[in-house]
Structures are given as C-alpha cells and as structure tokens.
Image (cartoon, helix red, strand yellow):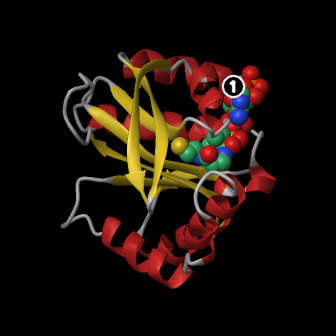
Amino acid sequence: MVTIRRARAADAAAIAAVHVETWRDTYAGLVPSRVLVGMRRRHKAAMWSQALDRRRTRQVVMVAEDAPGAVVGFGSCGPAKGAGLDFDGEVYTLYVLPDYQGRGIGARLLAGLFEALLAGGSRSALIWVLAGNPARFFYQTAGGAWIAVREERLWGVTLREMAYGWDDLEHAVAVLRSHSAT
Ligand SMILES: CC(C)(COP(=O)(O)OP(=O)(O)OC[C@H]1O[C@@H](n2cnc3c(N)ncnc32)[C@H](O)[C@@H]1OP(=O)(O)O)[C@@H](O)C(=O)NCCC(=O)NCCS
C-alpha cells in the first residue's frame, strides 16, 4: 500500500532520484537532451534539501512511499508565482515513477497538495505544464480548467506551457478523493 505523507529532510536524496528518473522518462524529446543528460542526483538532492528546510521556504513537499524510505512519487506546492492570474496557490511539481503511474498515486498526491494549500489559506490553485506533455490530460481528468498559455525561453529554446486552474480547492479535493475511493 502506497502512503502519501509530508516529506521530511531525510527524503531529499530519494526525491532527487525520482526527480531525475521521471524527468528523463517524461521530457525526452520535449526539452533538450543535454539538459536531461546533465541532470545529477547530487545537485537535485541539494536543491530538495533547501526546499525541505521549513525555515527557508513556504513550499510544501509531499511524497508517495511504497515502503519506509522508498519514495515512488512526489509533489510540491506553495503560493502562486508570477502575477496576472487570479489563483492563490500553485502546484510546482508532481512526478510519479513510470512503474507506479496509472495506479491512482498522482491523484492522491494532488489531493494531498491541494489539502496543504487549503491548510495554508489558499482557496484556488493552478499548475503549469508543457503543452507537449500528455500529463496535461491528467489535470483535465482531475477537474482542472485550461486557463492560460505562455511561451517561456528555457535552456536556449522556446517552450509552450499551458496552465490548468482549480477555483475551488475544497470541491477539487472532494472529487479527487471520491474518485480514488472507487
Ligand atoms: C501525470 C502523473 C503525475 C499522473 O499520476 P498517475 O499516478 O499516473 O495518475 P493516476 O493513476 O492517479 O490517474 C488518475 C486519473 O487520471 C487519468 N490519467 C492519468 N494520466 C493521464 C494522462 N496522461 N492522460 C489522460 N488521463 C490520465 C487516469 O486514467 C485516472 O483516471 P481514472 O481514475 O478515471 O482511470 C504521472 O503520470 C507522472 O508522473 N507523469 C510523468 C511526469 C509528469 O509529466 N508530471 C507532470 C509535470 S507538470
């Protein structure tokens, strides 16, 4: 049984391993190969250590754990970044290992992130996803409405991103929870 819980400082290395594996699996052909080849678990572990330091950030990180210490997915959220869109919270990351996808873990992680945002006072949330990433249909399945599109210059290339929004997180959590209970 996979458990969803708040991440702890000790999870940084395990999150980094999932981060690198899922990026290489998801973004091949979408972002430049040199970016994926150049990813290092060590660097990502240092990044996640900082993100997990509650004194330094308002970010919340959740993990999906198959056995103690065996992280198979993670997600993070916090205040919406950037201006112009009328949403309080933002899901920054959401990744499930390829072998664990399609088992309801992503939906449970998303519900956990939305609950964390609600606990922090957010009523609504958005997420940005690469337009070429089929994961965007997961957000539609999860009740997100397509609210915006932007072009970002990243790693020397122009990438098209789409934002999905939920204007009522309580309702979104109820729908996600009822779905994962069936
Ligand atoms: C996107 C992701 C987080 C979804 O997690 P998951 O555990 O595979 O999804 P779940 O099993 O919880 O799926 C929940 C529902 O969404 C649907 N769904 C999942 N991925 C989907 C997709 N790509 N397209 C359409 N529907 C999808 C499922 O069929 C399921 O619906 P159902 O209950 O009616 O069958 C996961 O597939 C993943 O990590 N993908 C690669 C990384 C990525 O792209 N992350 C997002 C970056 S913004």
Q: Quadrant of residue 33?
A: bottom right
Confirm if mark 1 falls within 8 A of ligand 1.
Answer: no
Looking at the image, which residue is at 69% across and 25% down? 181
Horizontal and vertical percent position of residue 160: 48, 38
Q: Is residue 159 visible?
A: yes
Assign a secondary structure to mark 1. Answer: helix
Which residue lies most toward the bottom here?
42
Q: Quadrant of the C terminus?
A: top right
Q: Label 1: few (<14), some or many (≥20) within 10 Å?
A: few
Horizontal and vertical percent position of residue 171: 44, 15
Foreground residue among 171 and 29:
29
Horizontal and vertical percent position of residue 164: 46, 26
Which residue lies most toward the right here?
99
Q: Is residue 104 visible?
A: no
Foreground residue among 47 and 54:
47
Q: Is residue 182 left or right of residue 73?
A: right
Q: Is residue 120 left or right of residue 65?
A: left
Looking at the image, which residue is at 28% across and 69% down? 53
Q: Is residue 22 left or right of residue 41?
A: right
Residue 69 position (above or below residue 103): below
Residue 37 position (above or below residue 91): below
Q: Which residue is mark 1?
A: 181
Label 1 is placed on what type of residue? Answer: Ala
Q: Quadrant of residue 31?
A: bottom right
